[in-house]
């Protein structure tokens, strides 16, 4: 019997009016806990939203359960193959320079030979490539934090592709643990660590940021690039886990004051925040 490709799964494509795309993406994040991929062109009247699942059946079930109040012109569930995912990322994910000395390099691109710190990533089924503002903010805030304070330990909550933890190792943090709710992300993180020659230097594991246990051993720095609703609920656990600093992102700009206020009520201090008009990140000291 031919072995089934473990990277096959289900893909749900939604064709939506461009003005409704953001609301539908928010629903996907909140209701499904998935990160949607929006494919659209500037000034286009329609956008395509792609959502990836572990199986075709799961994609089909979500298609049948789409709320009637979402404005969706067409929905299609289909099976995807590993090569479909790879082709998508090779088209959309390019080499990126960020911060003072960081560079994100897709696995399929040649690595430039200079003094910059190269972080080699293949997203697989996980997310976090440095292209989205929230990941870029965390990487640059991580680099800046290391220039202003001594950081020996770090927890990466909601690690995704593992990109922040891999960068942290290469920037010199000696003790790092990272976790994600999705076991697929954990597998991909270990592969990405190996691609960067840092396998065994980061402890990746599956955990829920809303459940105690992951924070049993506090760290100097906590990175949490997760949804605002989760940040707000997890705030007490995140605060208790941080000895010095929190890097928070995954926040809509309109939600930033609510996030900052929640952590201020816990006795923290907002050091700075930055945004791109839609997304926001902030540095919080405890």
Image (cartoon, rainbow, N blue to C red):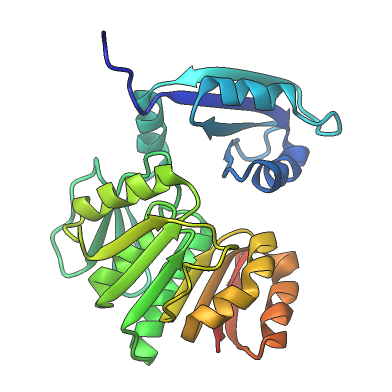
Is 186 situated left or right of 47 in this image?
left
Is 27 situated left or right of 7 in this image?
right
Which of the two residues, 160 or 217, is positioned nearer the viewer here? 217
Spot occupied by residue 269 in the image (x, y as percentages of width and height): 62, 90
Q: Quarter of the image for the C terminus: give it.
A: bottom right
Residue 282 appears in the rendering: no
Is 218 situated left or right of 276 in this image?
left
Q: Quarter of the image for the N terminus: give it.
A: top left
Spot occupied by residue 5 in the image (x, y as percentages of width and height): 32, 22
Spot occupied by residue 157 in the image (x, y as percentages of width and height): 48, 64
Is 51 situated left or right of 262 in this image?
left
Spot occupied by residue 40 in the image (x, y as percentages of width and height): 60, 35
Quarter residue 197 falls in: bottom left
Residue 48 appears in the rendering: yes
The residue that appears at 37% across and 72% down in the rendered structure is 99
Q: Is residue 220 above or below residue 197?
A: below
Q: Residue furthest right?
A: 69
The residue that appears at 32% across and 71% down in the rendered structure is 176
The residue that appears at 41% across and 78% down in the rendered structure is 217
Q: Residue furthest left?
A: 113
Q: Is residue 266 above or below residue 88?
A: below
Q: Is residue 186 above or below residue 154?
A: above
Quarter residue 168 falls in: bottom left
Which of the two residues, 248 or 6, is positioned nearer the viewer here? 6
Q: Is residue 97 above or below residue 7?
A: below
């Amino acid at each position: 019997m031919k072995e089934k490709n473990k990277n096959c799964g289900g893909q749900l494509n939604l064709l939506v009016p461009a003005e409704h795309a953001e609301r539908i993406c928010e629903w996907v994040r909140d209701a499904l806990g998935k990160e949607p991929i929006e494919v659209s062109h500037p000034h286009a009247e329609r956008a395509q939203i792609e959502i990836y699942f572990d199986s075709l059946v799961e994609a089909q079930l979500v298609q049948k359960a789409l709320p009637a109040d979402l404005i969706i012109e067409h929905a299609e569930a289909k099976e995807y193959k590993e090569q479909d995912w790879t082709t998508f990322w090779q088209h959309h994910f390019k080499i990126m320079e960020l911060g003072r000395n960081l560079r994100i390099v897709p696995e399929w691109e040649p690595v430039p030979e200079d003094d910059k710190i190269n972080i080699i990533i293949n997203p697989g089924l996980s997310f976090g490539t440095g292209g989205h503002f929230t990941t870029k903010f965390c990487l640059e805030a991580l680099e800046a934090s290391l220039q202003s304070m001594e950081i020996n330990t770090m927890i990466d909550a909601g690690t995704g592709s593992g990109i922040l933890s891999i960068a942290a190792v290469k920037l010199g943090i000696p003790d790092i643990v990272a976790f994600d709710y999705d076991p697929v992300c954990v597998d991909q993180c270990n592969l990405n660590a190996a691609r960067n020659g840092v396998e065994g230097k980061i402890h990746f594991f599956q955990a829920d940021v809303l459940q105690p246990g992951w924070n049993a051993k506090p760290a100097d720095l906590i990175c949490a690039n997760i949804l605002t609703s989760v940040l707000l609920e997890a705030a007490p656990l995140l605060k208790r886990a941080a000895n010095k600093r929190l890097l928070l992102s995954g926040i809509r700009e309109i939600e930033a004051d609510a996030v900052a206020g929640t952590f201020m009520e816990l006795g923290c201090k907002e050091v700075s925040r930055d945004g791109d008009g839609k997304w926001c990140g902030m540095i919080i000291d405890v």
